[in-house]
Image (cartoon, rainbow, N blue to C red):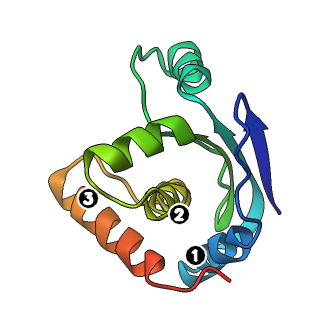
Amino acid sequence: MIHFFYENIDENIDENLKNWIENIIVSEGKKLGEINYIFCDDEYLLKINQDFLDHDYYTDIITFDQVRGKTISGEIFVSLQRIKDNASLISKNYEEEKKRVIAHGILHLCGYKDKTEEEQKTMRAKEDFYLSLKTE
């Protein structure tokens, strides 16, 4: 089951994205477990970053992996404020960038990494592929 939660923001995420997220999981040969997306502002996510990862910087997403075998579960914290700022900086559409980050978190849970240049290329190709699919 996929759940959307909101902390310190007024924006709501389109519920149709849940089907799209589940399609990503199934397409990757995985099963849906329990996924919690927590959409928040920069300060909320900064506190998560400081408290749990000992990092003192803003980020757009933090994924906590609770995967068991092929069953995808976890908590994904997403700063909509950071996505909006990043989209503006790179001249991208906010809605598209938001979907990219949402997919990015799921792809991490599916086992994709992004530490090396090669891993980043693979991750970006996967994001692009899933962004090309309909969200409904």
What quarter of the picture does the N terminus occupy? Answer: bottom right
Q: How far is the residue under mark 2 from the one under mark 1?
A: 9 Å
- Dot 2 corresponds to which residue? 110
Residue 83, horizontal then vertical, whole percent: 45, 44
What quarter of the picture does the C terminus occupy? Answer: bottom right
- Residue contact between numbered discs 2 and 1, judged by CB atoms under 8 Å: yes
Question: Residue at the spot x=57%, y=76% of the render?
Answer: 24
Question: Residue at the spot x=45%, y=44% of the render?
Answer: 84
Q: How far is the residue under mark 3 from the one under mark 2?
A: 13 Å
Q: Residues within 10 Å of mark 3 (few under 14, many from 20)?
A: few
Question: Residue at the spot x=72%, y=69% of the render?
Answer: 18
Q: Is residue 33 above or below residue 84?
A: below
Question: Residue at the spot x=61%, y=73% of the render?
Answer: 25
Residue 15, horizontal then vertical, whole percent: 77, 66
Residue 49, horizontal then vertical, whole percent: 51, 22
Number of marks: 3
Is residue 87 toward the left or the right of residue 118 in the image? right
Q: Is residue 2 above or below residue 10?
A: below
Q: Secondary structure at mark 3?
A: helix
The amino acid type found where label 3 is placed reads: Glu
- Dot 1 corresponds to which residue? 24
Of mark 3 and mark 2, the one earlier in the sequence is 2
- Dot 3 corresponds to which residue? 119
Is residue 27 toward the left or the right of residue 84 in the image? right
Which quarter of the figure has residue 32?
bottom right
Q: Residues within 10 Å of mark 1 (few under 14, many from 20)?
A: many
Q: Secondary structure at mark 2?
A: loop
